[in-house]
Amino acid sequence: MSLTLNDVFFRLLFATLVSGIIGWDREQRNHPAGIRTHILVCIGSCILALCQIAICLQALKISQLHPFLTRVITANPARLIAQVVSGIGFLGAGTIVVTKHFVTGLTTAASLWVTAALGIVIGMGYYEIAIPGSIIVIIVVILLNRLLKIKRIHQVEIKYYHRQQTTKLLRKYFHQNHIKIEHYSFHINKSDMDGDERIYTTVYTLKLPKTLTYDQMLDQLSANENIVQMNLVAR
């Protein structure tokens, strides 16, 4: 067995293609880890896997040339791969954002982890695992949500002035547009001050009618001068 230059180029290009498709989906959804991050993670994993193969082949060649060194020279094919599997967790954890009200970035972290795994199997040359694995991952990441037509419920964090007045206007808007409030939480942060003005925060879990999108709702609410900031997060 030998690792030719053509093998190296093919595996690296294969890793770039697969990870690029996964990263493209994350980029389109405006997530922190996009196409370049996923490609670099997959190529890095692939390079380390290729390096591990080269080390093993070199150890095997030396053992064949010098049989008396067989007991001395050893090469564990899983050593570098184990470091990739554990190390990628730190990068994935960096994409997860935890706040008082919601957690985001879990799917992006999982896509980075599985991209690293694909890079390893591609680098090792296990195409019988890499090809079906790549197809399934792409279906799950890109097509599953569209095929199942999942209706997401979002949480909307709204920061505003004049608590009673603005809350009344928000409730009126939700009622007029047939927006159902599944849940809401309210809090006052003492540090949220704009001069002498107190800034209040309410997080609504909303279910919108089919005729209204979240982008349209945010655009319409942003016209209210009492509203300071709005953040939309999928649950």
Image (tube, rainbow, N blue to C red):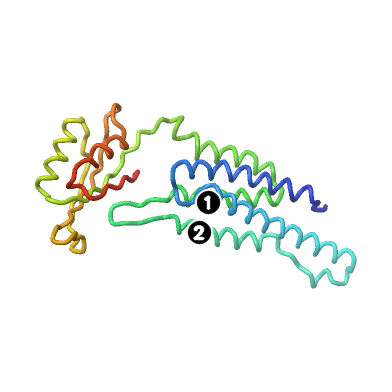
- To which residue does mark 2 refer? 91
Does 199 sit left or right of 45 as displayed?
left
Q: Percent from the top left, x then y, of residue 86?
A: 55, 61
Residue at the spot 71% in from the left edge and 63% down from the top edge? 76
Amino acid on which disc 1 is placed: Leu
Q: Which mark is residue 157?
A: none
Q: Percent from the top left, x then y, of residue 45?
A: 63, 55
Q: Is residue 12 above or below residue 53?
A: above
Q: Which mark is residue 112?
A: 1
Determine which quarter of the picture holds residue 176: top left
Q: 150 or 44: nearer the eye?
A: 44
Amino acid on which disc 2 is placed: Leu
Residue sitting farthest toward the left: 164
User: The C terminus is located in which quarter?
Assistant: top left
Label 2 environment density (alpha carbons within 10 Å; few <14, some 14–19, many ≥20):
some
Does 172 sit left or right of 97 as displayed?
left
Residue at the spot 28% in from the left edge and 44% down from the top edge? 155
Q: 159 or 206: nearer the eye?
A: 159
Q: Percent from the top left, x then y, of residue 135?
A: 59, 37
Q: Is residue 70 above or below residue 11?
A: below
Q: Percent from the top left, x then y, of residue 99?
A: 32, 56
Q: Is residue 83 above or below residue 168?
A: below
Residue at the spot 15% in from the left edge and 39% down from the top edge? 171
Marks 1 and 2 in Cβ contact (< 8 Å): yes
Label 1 environment density (alpha carbons within 10 Å; few <14, some 14–19, many ≥20):
many
Q: Earlier in the sequence, mark 1 or mark 2?
A: 2
| Mark 1 secondary-structure assignment | helix
Does 33 sit left or right of 204 as displayed?
right
Residue at the spot 85% in from the left edge and 62% down from the top edge? 61
| Mark 2 secondary-structure assignment | helix
Q: CA distance from mark 1 to mark 2?
A: 8 Å
Does 121 sit left or right of 55 as displayed?
left
